[in-house]
Amino acid sequence: MTDTAERAIAILKENDRGAYTVPTKGLYPFQWNWDSCLTALGQRHFDESRAWTEIETLFAHQWPDGMVPHIVFHVRDDGYFPGPDVWASGRPTATSGITQPAVAGFAVRRLWEAANDRTAADARARALLPKIAAWHRWFFANRDPAGEGLVAIIHPWESGRDNSIDWDETLERVPTEGIAPYSRRDTQHADPAHRPTKAQYDHYIWLVERFRSLGWDNSKLHDASPFRIVDPGFNAILLRACADLADVADALGAPEIVAENRAFAAKGLAAMESLWSEPGGQYLCRDRLTGTLIASASVGGLLSAFAAIPAPRAAALAGTIGARARACRYIVPSHDPADPRFEAKRYWRGPAWLVANYMIADGLARAGEQATAAAITRSSLELIAQSGFAEYYDPHSGEPCGGGSFTWTAAMVLEFLDRT
Ligand code: GLC
């Protein structure tokens, strides 16, 4: 085992809280949805059973309507805002009231397919299948009421790309008046210049308070939200998860789950075409209220490679990433560096993130774009060698930003090492 792999495993163990893993100490002291699913992919390299537990713990906190919340507040910790009292979700174990990218179906497929303990993997996958299927069904029922095949996010945090430039215009429509006074905690753990701004936080909190005032009734939230965006990356992750879940369900003899999820994937992939921007060489977000594409070349549109998009689209995305590689030393920046709004150190407005790199590289490799996938893998491992296991990195200098000893960064490293 390499020294890098040993360091990655040490971080995963250090952040392990028994049945779930915190993203990093201090900044994020609870369980996050997509962090956990991607973390399991790292854990499988040294403890397969523990990897299954990570996902099972998340799904033990699924809502009765099928939603899987973005945060599970297993313990009390005042180090994070907004905490359980702000969300007031009314769940037995406190959770947030919004969701996150649905990567669980993909993660389960990968754990199941690569398992050494076949009997355990079959049993544990079989138990998770209906839960993940219920989450997928929840998405299309509640976030695609018109049946277009693509789902909307109703809060920037759902995308997992909290302060992306993608949301700027739409957030202007979200009021900030009347929100309860609050004090942020994130800026006590990380450099404020690397974090979202106060103005953005005000919008985030207004949305939380609005949804809370509707009792977190998901049949009302979509239409009540002034923020409704069809994010290509978010949808690609969901569509990939539908296809992967269907494959596992097929092997394990759950035909209804197969049929339903294959139908979601086929319809969604066809609808993805409406988000393609030929001049941009990538997919773009659509504002569901105005029906227009948002001119913002973020990594969300590149993450679309994770789903089974048409080969010419994957080739075009590889070309766009090649252009980004000529503008930055490290890829993949979370935003086009040529855009004047790009900020090299501010969270999702420019920095490179290893989780995004992993999903893009995986998708491109499947589409036959091996050279670009290999370039992304190389860049990711160079960042680790230079700057350690940070939350994200300045794509020009490689400087580590945000939190340190970061769980999903470590997990992705084990996956990248496995593939090289
Ligand atoms: C930030 C990221 C989000 C992640 C969370 C925990 O909010 O934007 O994607 O899930 O931190 O790591």
Image (cartoon, grey):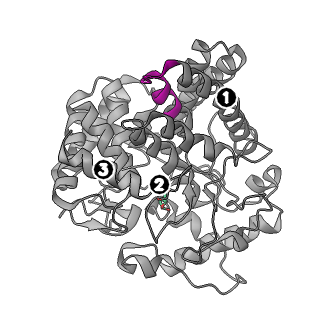
Neighbours of disc 1 within 10 Å: few (<14), some (14-19), many (20+): few
Question: Tags 2 and 1 in contact by the CB under 8 Å rule?
Answer: no
Residue at left 37%, top 46%?
A: 411
> From mark 3 to mark 1, how far is it between C-alphas?
29 Å
Residue at left 63%, top 57%?
A: 72
Label 3 amino acid?
A: Ala
Query: Where does label 3 land, which residue?
Result: 8
- The kind of secondary structure element at disc 1 is helix
> The magenta stretch spans which residues?
107-118
Label 1 amino acid?
A: Ala
Place of residue 76 in the rendered image (x, y in percent of width and height, measured from the top left):
64, 71
| Label of residue 16 in the image | 2
- The kind of secondary structure element at disc 3 is helix
Query: Where does label 1 land, which residue?
Result: 127
> From mark 3 to mark 2, how far is it between C-alphas?
13 Å
| Label of residue 415 in the image | none
- Residue 294, above or below 64: below
Left or right of residue 3: residue 91: right
From the viewer's side, name the closer residue of 39 and 279: 39
Mark 3 vs mark 2: in front:
2
Place of residue 214 in the rendered image (x, y in percent of width and height, measured from the top left):
83, 63
